[in-house]
Amino acid sequence: MAQITKDMTMGEMLMVDEGIAYILMQCGMHCIGCPSSIGETLEQACLVHGLDADAVMDYINEYLGQKDEA
């Protein structure tokens, strides 16, 4: 199973699974399509948006885990 970490960039996460974009948008990160956001780490993006990076990371990894189980 692929695992997402807080130091991965948005671009790296989207290469793992494009469905992560939907999760990020649900969390309030509507800038995922912005070219400058691709180089930000998950932790940096969460800081900018006032989100808990650990919680967002856990949410993404839960999604990836459920996909692997299916």
Image (cartoon, rainbow, N blue to C red):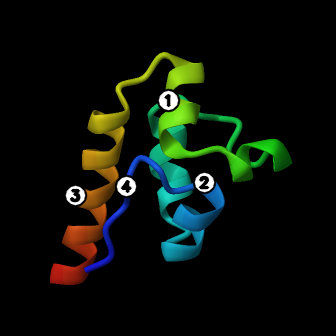
Q: Tag 2 or tag 4, which sits nearer the N-term? A: 4
Disc 4 and disc 3: Cα gap in Å? 12 Å
Q: Is residue 3 left or right of residue 14?
A: left
Residue at left offset 20%, top offset 70%? 66
Q: Tag 4 or tag 1, which sits nearer the N-term? A: 4
User: Which residue is the site of mark 3?
Assistant: 62
> Are the residues flagged by discs 4 and 3 in contact, CB closer than 8 Å?
no
* Residue 4 % position (x, y): 37, 61
User: Which residue is the site of mark 1?
Assistant: 46
The amino acid pointed to by label 4 is Thr
Depth check, front residue: 24 or 51: 51
Depth check, front residue: 27 or 13: 13
Q: Tag 1 or tag 3, which sits nearer the N-term? A: 1
Element on which disc 2 rests? helix
Of tags 3 and 1, which is closer to the observer? 1
- Above or below, 46 against 70 in this view is above
Mark 4 crowd level (few <14, some 14–19, many ≥20, 10 Å Cα):
some
Q: Tag 2 or tag 1, which sits nearer the N-term? A: 2
Q: Tag 3 or tag 4, which sits nearer the N-term? A: 4
On residue 38, the disc is none
Quadrant of the frame with the C terminus:
bottom left
> Are the residues flagged by discs 2 and 3 in contact, CB closer than 8 Å?
no
Element on which disc 4 rests? loop
